Image (cartoon, grey):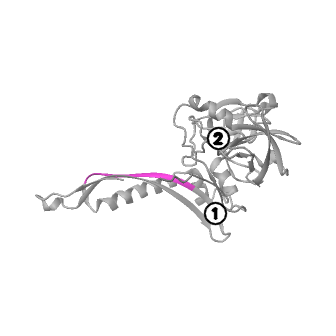
Amino acid sequence: MNICHLNSRWNGDDLHKDLGEAYVKVDWEIFDPLNKKIMGKWTTDGVGYLDYGVKKGQALIIATALENAAENLGRTQGFYDVVSGKSTAYPYPEKSKHSWLELEATRPLYNQNIQKEYNFIRRAVVLIRTSSGHGSGFFINDEGYALTNSHVVGNAKTVSIVDSNGTTFMADVIRTDERRDVALIKAPVTNNSYIPLQTKKFPKMLDKVYAVGAPLTEALKGTVSEGIISNFRKSSKSGLGMIQASVEIAPGSSGGPLLDKYGNVIGIAVQGYGQSATQYSRFIPIDDALDSLNLHLVKKPTFQ
């Protein structure tokens, strides 16, 4: 909120009046009490303002911002489909089967051109070898923890990973979620490069994005492709949300990061479509990946 409180000694009518503006971000859920399931979850913004003084103006400004957020919810297609009956199921990821896990990560979000940060990004993306082939993954903190797809690691307890310098490590598979197709692995390394995760701002249509991975062969590890957010879909198998982007990926890219224009992770590669499976691709939203693994990144405590 940005509030101006009017308090004039000369005009009693102007005492205790407020003007200004407020911004709110509201998380909404629709709960089906019969089936005891969350039918949908959305986040909308709202803005309220007064350009003249009003008594108890702060409350009015907040109420206006909330009203604006509610109007924006009503304009959300998924919300409309559920309440209008066009969609009888708008699935939201169920509660994770995993216990709460906190990992320390201190790197702030990138906020400049991705080219400035790419050297760090390149070193954070790894190739993952399994008995059935290879996939991709990326470090999420400097203690060797990385994310990839569940279908990349399969039923393995350990996998082999190769970093950007060609060094090979054995990594433990810490936890997986087959429905959301994500996995957390841990390599015996520290002070490794890693990529910040953009969990506070969901991507929008036409946003520029980049994918990094190892399409087709191991020799192509570290390949970067560019595109835009082209739609938001639901998986025909699980019903869970997917980010669709016009980014070229191929088998071997699975588990690699989808990056915003600054280089922050917004998704995980999972599937390609089109000729040679490269024209349109789908990605798991990074928020959903963390939720399904019950994984929480926290800042290291500082001592004075």
Q: Is residue 50 magenta?
A: yes
Where are the magenta residues, as a range? 42-52
Res 138 seen here: yes
Under circle 1, the secondary element is strand
Residue that numbered label 1 is attached to: 38
Residue visible at 44% across and 52% down in the picture: 46
**Count of numbered badges drawn on the protein:** 2
Q: Main secondary structure of the magenta part?
A: strand
Q: Is residue 222 magenta?
A: no
Q: Nearer the viewer, mark 2 or mark 1?
A: 2
Under circle 2, the secondary element is loop
Query: Considering only vertical position in the picture, is 39 above or below 273?
Result: below
Observer-nearest of 261 and 111 = 111
From the top left corner, tell me how far across and down residue 73 is, in percent: 51, 54
How busy is the neighbourhood of tag 2: few (under 14 within 10 Å), some, or many (20 plus)? many
In this view, the residue farthest toward the front is: 304
Separation of residues labelled 2 and 1 (CA atoms): 34 Å
Which quarter of the picture shows residue 219?
top right
The type of residue carrying mark 1 is Ile
From the top left corner, tell me how far across and down residue 293 is, in percent: 70, 56
Q: Which of the numbered marks, if any, corresponds to residue 194? A: 2
From the top left corner, tell me how far across and down residue 175 is, in percent: 75, 55
Which quarter of the picture shows residue 247?
top right
